[in-house]
Image (tube, rainbow, N blue to C red):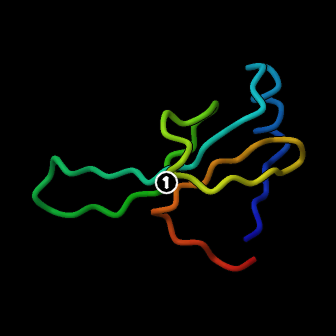
Amino acid sequence: MRIKITHKAKEFLHRSEKTELYIEHFDDSQCCIPLTTSPAVRKGRPSKPKKFNVYTVDGITVYYDRNLACKPN
C-alpha cells in the first residue's frame, strides 16, 4: 500500500510537534440507515495501537486501522 502525506499535512504535524498520525474507520451507528463515510485522520497515536497496521512515511509514523480496506499501491 502507498501512503502519501501532503506538504501541508507535514507542516501541520510539525507545528503540532507530532510525528504520528492515525487513520481510523469512522462508524456512525446512531442512525437506522448504515452510512458509508470517509475514514477519520487524526494526529497523534491511537488509544489502541494494536488494532492498527503501522507504516513509516517520510519520518512520520502512520497507524492504519485494520478494519479499513487496503489497496495495493
Q: Quadrant of residue 18?
A: top right
Q: Nearer the viewer, residue 7 or 60?
A: 60
Identity, as a three-letter code, of the amino acid under mark 1:
Pro
Residue name at image x 78 percent, y 32 percent: 19
Few, some or many residues within 10 Å of mark 1 (<14, 14–19, 20+): some
Residue name at image x 54 percent, y 36 percent: 46
Q: Position of residue 64 (x, y in %)?
A: 60, 54
User: Which residue in the structure is indicated by mark 1?
Assistant: 39
Quadrant into which the N terminus falls: bottom right
Q: Position of residue 41 (x, y in %)?
A: 57, 44
Which residue sits furthest front?
50
Q: Quadrant of residue 55?
A: bottom right
Q: Position of residue 22 (x, y in %)?
A: 60, 43
Q: Quadrant of residue 17?
A: top right
Residue name at image x 76 percent, y 39 percent: 9
Which residue sits furthest bottom?
72
Figure check: 36 above or below 56: below
Q: Position of residue 33 (x, y in %)?
A: 15, 62
SS category of the residue bearing label 1: loop
Figure check: 58 above or below 11: below
Quadrant into which the C terminus falls: bottom right
Left or right: where 30 falls relative to 12: left
Q: How many marks?
A: 1
Which residue sits furthest right?
58
Left or right: where 4 falls relative to 45: right
Residue name at image x 71 percent, y 35 percent: 20
